[in-house]
Image (cartoon, helix red, strand yellow):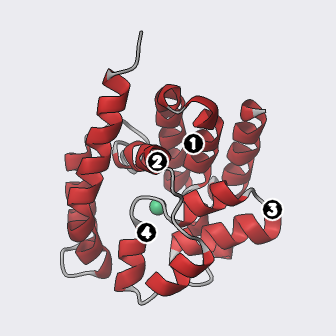
Amino acid sequence: MDDMVGAWATAVAEAELSSPLPRRWAHTQGVAERAKEVGQVLGVNAGLLIAAAALHDVGYAPRLAATGFHPLDGARFLRDEHGAEERLVRLVANHSFALLEAEERGLREALAAEFPLLEEPLLVDALVYCDMTTTPDGDRTTAQARVAEIRSRYGDDSLVGRFIRRAAPEIFASVKRVEAALAAQPR
Ligand SMILES: [Fe+2]
């Protein structure tokens, strides 16, 4: 079952991203690879993490970019066009501290009301970990380097720049918690 959800998610993401946004698709594939490695700490939720990793940035697809805020556009697409399961949709809507970016955009209340943050902290942290330890090209990196890259790409005075500076301590804390969970895992 888990494999089926992952395969479906990958196919949906590939269909939406690979041709219009090949670099975003490369990033997505890297994030999904990280999810396969981290899934061991999540037990029955491993497949859900892989699916969320594959679909987290689907809202960047030009045809889906209705509000221009990709977590919200992606979550609405998955809910409305695919009837995707609620936990998956809520993970995508809230990935990597989307609530903080939503606040910068005046969308925090709308996002929180439509897609409440999942009350499964390790799952939420794991998706942050996968996204934030993967470069825009899909390679492995550190969260510190990733945040620095986002700051330099968008500029500190931009909306995303303001968001990432506020989110950075939260991102680093999430990554630490997942690393601790991985280290505690029996081999
Ligand atoms: Fe994203």
**Image spot of residue 169 (x, y percent):** 20, 58
Residue topped by disc 4 = 98
- Tell me which numbered mark, 3 or 4, is placed earlier along the sequence: 3
Q: Secondary structure at mark 3?
A: helix
Q: Amino acid at mark 4?
A: Ala
Q: Is mark 3 within 8 Å of ligand 1?
A: no
Give the residue displayed 53% in from the left and 71% down from the top. 70
187 vs 110: above or below: above
77 vs 138: above or below: below
Q: Are marks 3 and 2 in contact (CB under 8 Å)?
A: no
**Image spot of residue 73 (x, y percent):** 61, 74
Q: Secondary structure at mark 4?
A: helix
Can you tell which mark lies on residue 127?
A: 2
Q: Could you classify mark 2 by the number of other residues whose Cα lies within 10 Å: few (under 14), some (14-19), or many (20 or more)?
A: many
Residue 34 in the figure: left or right of residue 90: left
**Image spot of residue 125 (x, y percent):** 40, 48
Q: Is mark 4 within 8 Å of ligand 1?
A: yes
53 vs 163: above or below: above
Q: CA distance from mark 4 to mark 1?
A: 17 Å
Residue topped by disc 1 = 49
Q: Secondary structure at mark 2?
A: helix
Q: Which quadrant does the C terminus fall into? A: top left
Residue 3 in the figure: left or right of residue 159: right
Q: Residue furthest bottom?
A: 106
Q: Are marks 2 and 1 in contact (CB under 8 Å)?
A: yes
Residue 185 in the figure: left or right of residue 179: right
Q: Amino acid at mark 1?
A: Leu
- Tell me which numbered mark, 4 or 1, is placed earlier along the sequence: 1
Decide if residue 68 is in sight here: no
Can you tell which mark lies on residue 175?
A: none
- Tell me which numbered mark, 3 or 1, is placed earlier along the sequence: 1
Can you tell which mark lies on residue 82?
A: 3
